[in-house]
Amino acid sequence: MRSGRHFLQIPGPTNTPERVQRAMHRAVIDHRGPGFAELGAGVLEGLKAVFRTEHRVVIYPASGTGAWEAALVNTLAPGDRVLMYETGQFATLWKNMAAKLGFDPVFMQGDWRSGANAEAIGAQLRTDKTHAIKAVCVVHNDTATGVTSDIAAVRRAMDEAGHPALLLVDTISSLGSIDFRMDEWGVDVTVAGSQKGLMLPPGLSFNAISPKAMAAAEAGGDRRSYWDWRDMAGPNDKGFFPYTPATTLLYGLREALDMLAEEGLENVFARHARHAEATRRAVAGWELEVLCRNPAEYSNSLTAVMMPGEKGADALRRIVLDGFDMSLGTGLNKVADKVFRIGHLGDFNDLMLMGTLSGVEMGLRRADVAYKSGGAQVAMDYLADNPLQET
Ligand SMILES: *Cc1c(COP(=O)(O)O)cnc(C)c1O
């Protein structure tokens, strides 16, 4: 038997705030009845502020992977070429999906320690004289590596190349944690999910859709039914859905959107930036290395830490789970057992971060690996000396 609360410090699903849990503790209502429309219309409208878009947002009762598929099958015709960038495991999975669906992904190689190279994307697009590439797909924050990509720079590179491809961006682990501006950055389709920065349980995912992407979907696209944006639009305009929505999760979403609005997105981003900085200082204090190479690309929602020496990262994760009841993120695919990931996104505060970093430091000590003690103290000093400046 354990007492006290489990620490869920994986980079999603994240800790669900009590306010959201209470909001979901309700009877399910008729999703075709008048009471539903207000809920539906409210969340569809409220999401726009978080995506920073004026355009349509659709909600699927699906995990983020479903919204990946929706983004592809609505905008691309069978066999269409797509340019995708290998930032880590999530970019790899999206590429695999594109291939499985019968599209033609061109996968630009990355080193799993860096973000998408906008210049290289621009150069690749310049060689595509016939405009065979119909979309560029980038993961804003690759959750496997803790590396972000400069989406505005990717858009600039596309424009400078004079290429008409759509820009599709996965923000599943950045939305509501790291600054993202759909309209300002010229993103055509934004993919998001409920269980990370939006602080909800898993089960909802989203597409935000530019008029250019919607026009592509209306003029063509692939075979689709469940994911079809065209079927969503009519009922959504009245606050309804074409099929049964996840009513309970929508109650939670309404509460989470209220919480983000009350705190203010700028404050939410500053809070995440400060906790990420404190975490990286702890890692440096332990004399360990962050997987992300370029400080400009550091993720503010999670930190992937390279395991020192021969000991596997999963052995450390096991020690931390067994000894201190905390879940840390595992290394995926190319970095399996080589890194562990600390999630510091969503509903989170200074003492939760200090509990997390203390658990890691105690784990390092028990695991008997080469590290310097005192990293948690470095983070504590940083947090104490740098109070959050709210606006
Ligand atoms: C979590 C995640 C996904 C996958 O989402 P699921 O909800 O597990 O289907 C995709 N991309 C990124 C960047 C993620 O963090």
Image: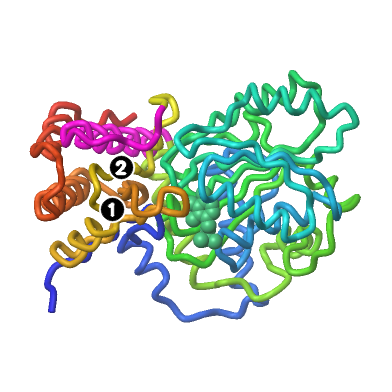
Residue at 23 percent of width and 36 percent of height = 288
Q: Which mark is residue 49?
A: none
CA separation in Å, label 1 and label 2? 9 Å
Quadrant (top left, top right, bottom left, bottom right) of the N terminus: bottom left
The mark nearer the N terminus, 1 or 2, is 2
Q: State the extent of the magenta-drawn residues as a range.
A: 266-293
Quadrant (top left, top right, bottom left, bottom right) of the C terminus: top left
Type of amino acid at the residue the image marks with label 2: Val
Question: What kind of secondary structure does the magenta stretch mostly adopt?
Answer: helix
- Percent coordinates x, y for residue 110 in the rendering: 55, 36
Res 187 → quadrant? top right
- How dense is the environment of label 1, judged by Cα within 10 Å: few (below 14), some, or many (20 and up)? many
- Percent coordinates x, y for residue 107 in the rendering: 67, 41
Q: Quick check: 304 left or right of 159? A: left
**Ligand 1 is within 8 Å of the C-beta of the residue at disc 1:** no
Q: Quick check: 187 left or right of 125? A: left
Q: Are marks 1 and 2 in contact (CB under 8 Å)?
A: yes
* Residue wearing tag 2: 305
- Percent coordinates x, y for residue 71 in the rendering: 70, 52
Which secondary structure, mark 2? strand
- Percent coordinates x, y for residue 372 in the rendering: 11, 36
- How dense is the environment of label 2, judged by Cα within 10 Å: few (below 14), some, or many (20 and up)? many
Q: Which mark is residue 313?
A: 1
Which secondary structure, mark 1? helix
Depth check, front residue: 157 or 92: 92
The answer to whether residue 194 is above or below residue 138 is below
Type of amino acid at the residue the image marks with label 1: Ala
